[in-house]
């Protein structure tokens, strides 16, 4: 799909490229960071396409990640590495992860860009509207400050012949060298054009997220950026309920080259 020419789209493209280094595709799922290269999606993507959810980008890679505050390293490590739930937040839904610190991610190499997943589908939400060159803001009702459930999502451009769709929500910053997955759903019918807020269609398969909770849970710090990603799979993988989302994402990246992106920022207060 043609790249957007507006200043707003260019700003979102820059965000996508930054996220790409986090989600793109240079590397595997091995023992170090789940990183990203450039081009199209949060952890293996470059939020590059993101005026409407993504116009061109890449995904999955091996960029190094930045550690969070040392005072909370134990809780973060438990959540990011073991899938267990860190200490609970005041709301009782989960802990809020401290902002990771460190040097910026390196830009993806040309080879990583060439091997990246392209964000060629449109992913949008009536609850997340980009403006003034910035990603749309996420309302507190969609976090553990509120109802802690996902917003309605809409998409288009699913490639013909797709066998399954998968949705992910991830922090664009890795935690303890690992991608932090707040929500992942597989088994979505490729004929669907969206899902309702807080409702999943029949056949949906839900992962156990990085908080150790099966389902959606988003407990962000103010100012954190997240990425919704829609993957189109050319063959059906259909994992079991409660699947491990980072491992499953590696399976997705091995066969899928089509994605849609929707970045969003949460501002408390």
Image (cartoon, grey):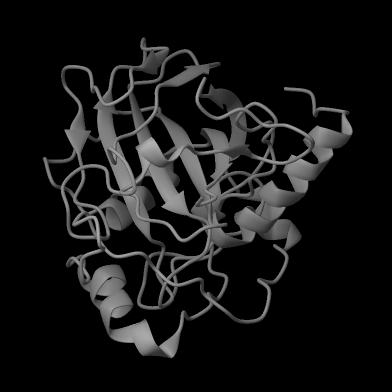
Quadrant of the image containing the N terminus: top right
Nearer to us in this view, 177 or 248? 177
Residue 10 is situated, as x and y percent measured from the top left of the image, at 83, 40
Image vertical order of residue 133 relative to residue 153, above or below: below
Residue 27 is situated, as x and y percent measured from the top left of the image, at 50, 66
Q: Quadrant of residue 76?
A: bottom left
Residue 91 is situated, as x and y percent measured from the top left of the image, at 24, 55
Q: Quadrant of residue 3?
A: top right
- Residue 95 is left or right of residue 122, and the answer is left
Q: Residue at x 47, y 38 (%)?
A: 229
Residue 29 is situated, as x and y percent measured from the top left of the image, at 38, 65
Nearer to us in this view, 87 or 20? 87
Image vertical order of residue 105 relative to residue 26, above or below: below
- Residue 46 is left or right of residue 142, and the answer is right
Q: Is residue 263 visible?
A: yes
Nearer to us in this view, 224 or 261? 224
Q: Is residue 158 visible?
A: no
Q: Quadrant of residue 150?
A: top left
Image vertical order of residue 72 relative to residue 202, above or below: below
Nearer to us in this view, 26 or 173? 173
Q: Residue at x 79, y 34 (%)?
A: 9
């Amino acid at each position: 799909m043609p790249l957007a020419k507006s200043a707003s789209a260019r700003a979102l493209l820059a965000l996508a490229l930054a996220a790409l280094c986090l989600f793109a595709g240079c590397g595997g799922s091995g023992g170090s960071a789940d990183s990203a290269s450039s081009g199209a999606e949060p952890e293996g993507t470059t939020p590059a396409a993101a005026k409407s959810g993504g116009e061109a980008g890449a995904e999955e890679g091996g960029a190094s990640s930045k550690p969070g505050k040392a005072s909370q390293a134990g809780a973060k490590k438990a959540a990011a590495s073991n899938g267990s739930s860190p200490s609970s937040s005041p709301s009782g839904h989960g802990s809020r992860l401290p902002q990771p610190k460190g040097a910026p991610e390196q830009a993806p190499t040309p080879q990583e860009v060439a091997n990246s997943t392209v964000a060629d589908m449109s992913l949008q939400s009536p609850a997340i509207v980009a403006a003034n060159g910035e990603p749309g803001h996420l309302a507190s009702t969609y976090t553990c400050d509120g109802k802690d459930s996902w917003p309605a999502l809409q998409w288009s451009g699913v490639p013909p012949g797709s066998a399954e769709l998968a949705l992910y929500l991830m922090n664009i910053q890795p935690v303890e060298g690992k991608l932090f997955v707040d929500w992942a759903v597989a088994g979505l019918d490729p004929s669907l054009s969206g899902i309702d807020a807080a409702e999943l269609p029949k056949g949906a398969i839900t992962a156990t997220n990085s908080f150790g909770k099966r389902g959606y849970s988003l407990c962000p710090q103010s100012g954190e950026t997240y990425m919704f990603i829609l993957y189109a799979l050319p063959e059906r993988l259909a994992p079991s309920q409660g699947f491990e989302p980072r491992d499953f994402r590696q399976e997705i990246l091995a066969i899928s080259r089509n994605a849609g992106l929707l970045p969003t920022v949460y501002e408390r207060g």
